[in-house]
Amino acid sequence: MPKTKITVVKRVSLKDLFGDNPPAHINEEMITPQCPAMKEGQEFIFEYDCPPGFCSWAFADIQRDIMLVQFGGSYPWIKERQVAIACCTDGLRPVIFRIERIED
């Protein structure tokens, strides 16, 4: 079965999203400015389960896109076949991923 590569494209910060006016009062002592679980450029290979070291919350968020690509699907708005762009649902510091099917 083909494998799927997940690449961390960008970690978005609270300030990137909202500048100095977040939509709620944030306790900045309790939250890092960017996701601490991922680093830009990291690559993970998906075969059957959440890859080791990959954030399980992010995996739950992007799993449908992983499966679409894994089984040969594509989105019509992305010119590259069998590629998807997805992000986790952390509303304060989301992470954007590139998902692509790779053949053995």
Image (tube, helix red, strand yellow):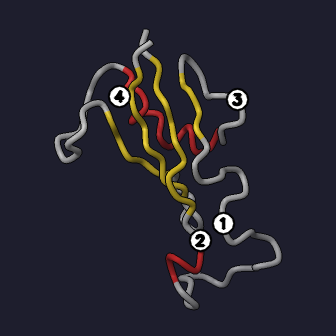
Residue 45 location in percent, x, y? 56, 27
- Does 76 sit left or right of 104 as displayed? left
| Earlier residue among tags 1 and 2 | 2
Alpha carbons under labels 1 and 3: distance apart = 21 Å
Q: Could you tell me which residue is drawn at 54 percent across and 48 percent down?
A: 8
- Split into 4 quadrants, where in the image is the N terminus? top left
Is there a contact, CB below 8 Å, between mark 4 and mark 1?
A: no
| Earlier residue among tags 1 and 3 | 1
| Secondary structure under the numbered disc 3 in the rendered image | loop
Alpha carbons under labels 4 and 2: distance apart = 27 Å
Label number found at residue 34: 1
| Earlier residue among tags 2 and 3 | 2
- Residue type beneath disc 3: Pro
Residue 95 location in percent, x, y? 54, 56
Q: Could you tell me which residue is drawn at 54 percent across and 25 percent down?
A: 46
Q: Residue furthest bottom?
A: 20
Q: Dot 4 surroundings within 10 Å: few (below 14), some, or many (20 or more)?
A: many
Label number found at residue 52: 3
- Split into 4 quadrants, where in the image is the C terminus? top left
Residue 44 versus residue 30 in the image, above or below: above
Is there a contact, CB below 8 Å, between mark 2 and mark 3?
A: no
Label number found at residue 25: none
- Does 93 sit left or right of 101 as displayed? right
- Does 100 sit left or right of 10 as displayed? left
User: Would you identify the image quadrant in which residue 67 lies?
Assistant: top left
- Does 33 sit left or right of 9 as displayed? right
The residue wearing badge 4 is 69
Is there a contact, CB below 8 Å, between mark 1 and mark 2?
A: yes
The residue wearing badge 2 is 13
